Image: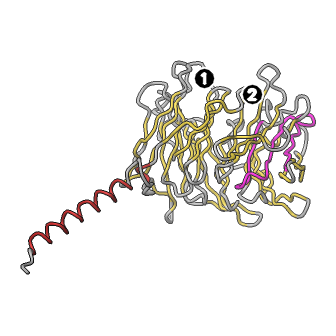
Amino acid sequence: MKIDFLAILNLKFVTALILLASISSCNSDDGIDSGDETDKTWIQSSSDFAPEASINQIAISRDGNTIAITDWDPNLKTTGTVKIFRKFVDEWQQIGESLSGIDDDKFGAAISLSADGNIVAVGAPSYNDVTGEVFIYEYTQDTWEPTGQISGAQRFTSLGVDLALNSDGSKIAIISKPLGRLGFNSVLSIYVQSGSNWESVINNFDNVTAVDVPLPSMAFSAEGNRVFLGYTHNTGFVDAYSVNGSALVSIGDRLVGENQLDWFGNIGINTSGSTVAIGGTGYPGADYRGIVKVYQNNSGWEQKGSSLYGEELDDRVGKKVALNEGASRLVVGAGIGISRSAFVRVYDFVEGDWNESLTISSNDIETFDQDLKLSDDGNTLVLLFGRKVEIWSFE
């Protein structure tokens, strides 16, 4: 019998083509997810989050599954109610009871969550005749149990105007600001949990010499071993420190804005604190276009990628900034000037530079309140536009 080898080869070739076509189809958007980041996109996963609330503060757990908000009465503006929500499949549900302060204590002026969202810290800077108080709760058996309180040292201390927990909730960095009293600067204190008590390891640290400077921007690393302070006063600057027992040790040189009135100093850090993003809304010199720079620490601070600039007057790029764990995703808040509505831009670090992947606009020129929070994996983004929250997911 005569064998047609050419026909056999053609048959094998056709079979191979069919197999390749099948694999390609499985990896398409309509088939099996290949796991490639290019297959993912940003979607707004919640457009009616706590619709009845008037929100002025937000916090997110590092795993991205828990969100805390302060529901603030816009008429009274004296105290708030803190509510914590957790994601169950595709739905956000409140967990535990709402947490409330007392009249005039400004409860909820600052909030922070642990990495898993089971510990929340709440600042009440006007508590007890503006002495200030920080309340700490843990989620246990469907309720928020009080586990600690930290009090201001004296009247007008205003402890708790800003705060941040480390990952496991065993350390907390707190900013105090003697509000309305000239001649006093903001100060930083760091507390460590010891049994049922909180012990001060850094007390009333002040790294500025000029008095009456604006409230600093503060960031605390996941391990609680690095803290950053940014001051947007005039040119603006950022200082980074490692927490060494009861001392703060400078990390690298001070990072300073380029021009007077750049207001450089709004900060966001990655999980370890090895990379910091800094925004300056006044750049260049009170033109209010804005600038954002990212620095990474390699035996000194080195800029990562290009600077990001506002395109128009009053863009005010860099009012808020956030980084994911690997410092590969950067979120920049902007546009909260008199003539510009708020907007947010997401950048990914690709081939050595920052590439814009998303712009989200508020479409509300009266939006002056804005905040943003990013999960460690960079896939959950929580935005505060005005008094309402938007949640975006990268999936």
Q: Quadrant of residue 13?
A: bottom left
**Is 144 on the left or on the right of 256, as rendered?**
right
Q: What is the x, y in percent for residue 109? A: 77, 36
Q: Which residue is mark 2?
A: 53
Dot 1 alpha-carbon crowd within 10 angstroms: few under 14, some 14 to 19, many 20 or more: many
Q: CA distance from mark 1 to mark 2?
A: 16 Å
- Tags 1 and 2 touching, CB below 8 Å: no
Q: Secondary structure at mark 1?
A: loop
**Is 77 on the left or on the right of 331, as rendered?**
right
Q: Which residue is mark 1?
A: 367
Task: Please name which of the two marks, 1 or 2, marks the residue nearer to the observer.
Answer: 2
**Is 27 on the left or on the right of 215, as rendered?**
left
Q: What is the x, y in percent for residue 42? A: 49, 41
Which residues, given as a range, are shown in magenta?
A: 109-137
User: Quick check: 270 above or below 72?
Assistant: below
Identify the residue at horizontal 90%, vertical 42% (top origin).
Answer: 154
